Image (cartoon, rainbow, N blue to C red):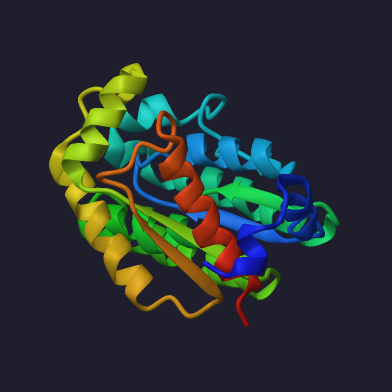
Amino acid sequence: MDIALSTMSRDSRADKFSNGLHLAIAGNIGAGKTTLVKMLAKEYGWKANLEAVDNNPYLKDFYDDMRKWAFPLQIYFLHSRFNQVLEAKEKKQTIIQDRTIYEDAYIFAKNLHQSGLMAQRDFENYFSLFQTMCHLTQAPDLLIYLKASVPKLLKQIAKRGRDYELDIDPNYLHALNKNYEEWISDYTEGKLVIIESDDLDFVENEADFSMIKNLIEEKLLSK
């Protein structure tokens, strides 16, 4: 790690990354995105933009009947994410976002279409709207991909105990992970950090959290 970076105080490091940056954490269901967003926001004084889950009017219905609710759920998420990106563009305060607008299209909607749960015309309509939104927005200054295997995802999903997620199909998570790998391998929109999280516990292990912070700071300071 750069000596100048390692000797900076916590306050000076936070100040260095506080002026209008847009960071986003990407990752599969149960990867730990929301927890990491909250921890980083607290550490640096950033604003956390969380995913619209708890108040989402479609999510429980979607898990009960994916084919019926796939399209309205994805439109709801896309709209919510678009508003967050617009807010990040307008704010002078650094914002860290829980999941990106790209994941809605390239991961979740794509998977629903591939698996036959979203009709062709609905997917085409959805993707056209997504492309229009992308023309009006910018990519994050830094994308942080929290990569996790399906066993790790299932363990963390069980731990947080959301009723509608407890019977989630491991094959569904496998398919999403495949889409994530394809998307990340082609990602050229901006700076990227990939965090292999299977052997990390950044909540309980301060060394793991410090490692993540150092990776983020080094990437933000790089040219």
Where residue 159 appears, x then y in whole percent? 30, 21
Q: Quadrant of residue 172?
A: top left
Residue 129 or 119: which is nearer the viewer?
129
Q: Please say if 158 is above or below 77.
A: above
Q: In this view of the protein, can residue 130 be seen by the observer?
A: yes
Seen from this angle, which residue lies furthest left? Answer: 171
Where residue 46 appears, x then y in whole percent? 72, 45
Q: Please say if 45 is above or below 124.
A: above
Q: Residue at x 20, y 25 (%)?
A: 167
Q: In the drawing, does residue 4 fall left or right of residue 118?
A: right
Residue 62 or 53: which is nearer the viewer?
53
Is the C terminus in the top left, top right, bottom left or bottom right quadrant?
bottom right
Where residue 37 appears, x then y in whole percent? 56, 41
Count every numbered label the image shows and give the total: 0
Q: In this view of the protein, can residue 133 be seen by the observer?
A: no
Q: Residue at x 66, y 58 (%)?
A: 7
Residue 175 or 161: which is nearer the viewer?
161
Q: Please say if 92 is above or below 38.
A: below
Q: In the drawing, does residue 12 fall left or right of residue 56?
A: right
Q: Residue at x 42, y 47 (%)?
A: 71
